[in-house]
Amino acid sequence: MKSIAQNAPGKTVLLMGNEAIARGALEAGVRVCAAYPGNPSSEIIGTLAKVAEEMGLHVEWSINEKVALEVAAAASFAGLRGLCAMKQNGLNVASDFLLNLNLTGCRGGLVLVVADDPAGVSSSNEEDSRHFAKMGDLPLMEPANFQEAKEMTKLAFKISEELELPVLIRSVTRVSHARGNVRLDELPQSSPKPRFDTSRALTAFPALPNHKILHERFNRAKKMFEESVFNFYRGPERPELMVVTCGSGWMYSLEAAINLNVQDRVGILKLGTTWPLPENFVLKHLKQADRVLFIEEVDPFLENNVKEIYAQNCLVLGLRAFFGKASKHIPDVGELNPEIVSHAIQNLLNISYEPRPAEYALRAHESTAELVPARALGFCAGCPHRATYWAIKVALTLDGRDGFVLGDIGCYSLGMGPSGFGQMKTLHAMGSGTGLACGLGQLNRFGLEQPVIAVCGDSTFYHAAMPALANAYYNGANFLLLLLDNSATAMTGFQPHPGTGYTAIGSEAPVIDLKAICKVFGAHVEVVDPFDVATTVETLLRLLQKEKGVKVLILKRECALVSAKHQKRLYQVEVDQELCLGESCGCNRLCTRIFKCPGLMWDQAAGKAHIDEAICTGCGVCAEICPGSAIRKEKA
Amino acid sequence: MFISKDPFNVIIGGVGGQGNVLASQILGEMLVSQGYVITIGETYGASQRGGAVMSHLRISAKDQFSALIPEGQCDLLIVLEPVEGLRILDYFGNPGVITLLNTRPIYPIDVISGNATYPEVSKVVARIKGLSRRVWTLNATEVALEMGDPIFANIVMLGALSAMEVLPIHRQGFESVITDLLPSRTLNENMKAFDKGREVVQELHE
């Protein structure tokens, strides 16, 4: 099989943006790589883990992003090159360390890649991580394609060493999770021996002198970026409109100009080093045009920072009109695409463009409106979370006190939607369901009568919920914590964690037992298999009605997608259409209308339930739910 | 054989879990090895959770294009689920588009629950025909189930694609990419799925 570590200089290969970043780090001689998985960043470390042994690297899935950044920074402190990767939410977690690390600086090259998820396609939030670079006076680069993703990463290590500062690379979904051609360069053959220089301490305190040193380094970065090959202008000498863009916006802008046939009217200023901005370079190009349009994803970061440069120099430059998110030519939420850029340019240049015949578009719209049903997201067929939320729904109904579920981040976030029966009522940060339960679990003294449930996944528990559970016991909160243990960080691609017994590179590791931890934290702990629906409901109900303190129920069942890879299905499931009474049963089509696993179908002709053999994974849960015993499961 | 337009835009669509990401990667690799500049944009996140998913492939002899195909600019649609074909043509279709369709439906949960209805597949196929220049169809899921695992449907579709002769891809290129990308034990099954797709696909005529 092909490896990211092939030493084939000059060869062109197809790489995902995240793989290109990993390759750039390898070409830079990275030695230590750490991350907590989070889309769209997960494949950076995942890719490096696969070649860790071959390339002599330390690659780890750390317990959370703050620890990951500390691990990578530690390598740098000892003179080696370190890489850390995370998604935008991860940087919030790591920011406490980052905003002290800027004051101490670093030694070996240290690169922090943050992959933002515009529109929050696989995130709880939409956030622009670039503000952290500005907050911390740290150099920031944004790749606009796959080759740049590799080259920038490689260069970032060098810049980091020269400035003795960590360098941030901000990617976005359409760079990280897209693929394109990348030309490989040579891999280095040697690496320095690590040594921590005890003659130079790395302490953020005292802050004032360190802050001053940081500003000196920052000014050097500004000078360095004036010459960067990642900043360039393409277009006429005096364009009617100057597009200022970075990252994914570059190719959208270029394509819009080509499609609209306005390459002689529109210039594109593409910036790769977006903090600190190369002021002189920007000013030089602001002189070329009276009208400027900003194209960038998430916040108006370039937009505001370029305007600030303009404000300082407006007497020299004269009047300029700026367009972008502030002027509403570009939406202020969501992902960019070629149409958004194209519409803004059409609007500003007053030109019309028809991408296809209007008659065709109308017919296509009509067909979709008439025939195409919505396709809501839901748990996979055979997902243990569906069974868990089913049990929660039944137990809360039987309990009758209007109890509710506090949630957080993971596949089980879908518990807020139809396939989790709308059970999850809060969603914020990693571990926040348990933290909120610490608070709501105190409110019975003020008269709160509803039982409080928190749900938390296994990986999330290690990442962020352990402190909350300790807090619950210490402060005497009353709630039921459900640990949804599917033995993987499933949502981001099944990465291992401290409960799985193996590491990022697949070597054996000690298991940090969930049950044991919860017991140490003073909780009453029980374990059930969510596929055993009756026992789960009974246990849930009993624990809900147990009076005081923090109770933990571990719902242990491996992710169905992981199981499918290494074991055969549990059951052969089929509907006995003799026994299924269909609409006349009185169950109100419980299996399909209410439980609605995608492995079930409604056989219109027979008016009875049916199993979709292309989808069913054989978990057998629907057989337990059918009140008429018409769904049968047999050991497969 | 060359691409008939530059960039030539391909969408591979379906439902999360049908393997459109792998199909787009295999197709991309086959074309990169012939010297084309490829960009693939993928819908992630929802990909394993039953949502509508798409991969966008931009194929060019010279330039790197963006990861998203602009409105109305799809040249070839490869779609693993019937109504997803209509959903994609709604935004990306144009009178010149060529479509390869897997006719096996996957029902959305709103259909399973009875809150929405799934149209007659023949009706969907007819509409797709009306919105495409040429259409090829097969039941790739059925072929894959006969092989013992619905997971092969994406490979069956790639085999079908090779028979259509709209892209410069061939069996040998597929074999070498599969050898590079996937564990060697899967090679025979994948080749079988590819060949089966080539064999059963048929162009739809009025």
Image: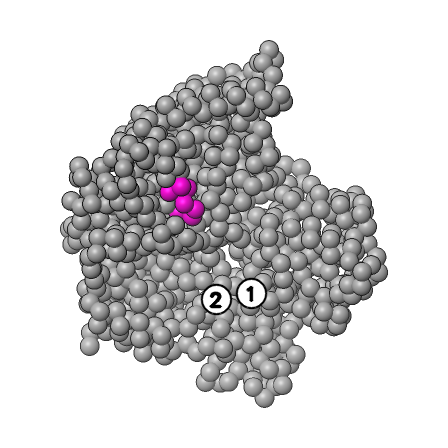
- Give the residues in magenta: A297-304
Quarter of the image with the C terminus of chain B is bottom left
Res. A474 mark = none
Question: What chain letter is assigned to the residue under label 2?
Answer: A
Q: Please name the colour scheme applied to the rendered image.
A: one colour
Q: Residue furthest front?
A: A315
Q: Mark 2 is on which residue type?
A: Ala
Residue depicted at x 77% and y 58%: A443
Question: What chain letter is assigned to the residue under label 1?
Answer: A
User: Is residue A568 one of those drawn in magenta?
Assistant: no
Q: Mark 1 is on which residue type?
A: Gly
Res. A376 mark = 2
Vertical placement of residue A305 versus B72, above or below: above
Residue depicted at x 32% and y 48%: A323
Vertical placement of residue A135 versus A389, above or below: above
Give the tally of numbered discs: 2
Q: Secondary structure at mark 2?
A: loop
Vertical placement of residue A407 versus A231, above or below: below
Res. A417 mark = 1
- Binning the other alpha carbons within 10 Å of mark 1 as few (below 14), some (14 to 19) or many (20 upward) gives some
- Asked whether, in this view, residue B25 is left or right of residue A403, the answer is left
Q: Residue furthest right?
A: A547
Q: Earlier in the sequence, mark 1 or mark 2?
A: 2
Pointer 1 and pointer 2: residues touching (CB < 8 Å)?
Answer: yes
| Closest to the observer, A405 or A7 | A405
Q: Please indicate, yes or no, whether residue A163 appears anywhere in the rendered image.
A: yes
- Binning the other alpha carbons within 10 Å of mark 2 as few (below 14), some (14 to 19) or many (20 upward) gives some
Q: Position of residue A264 (x, y in %)?
A: 15, 44
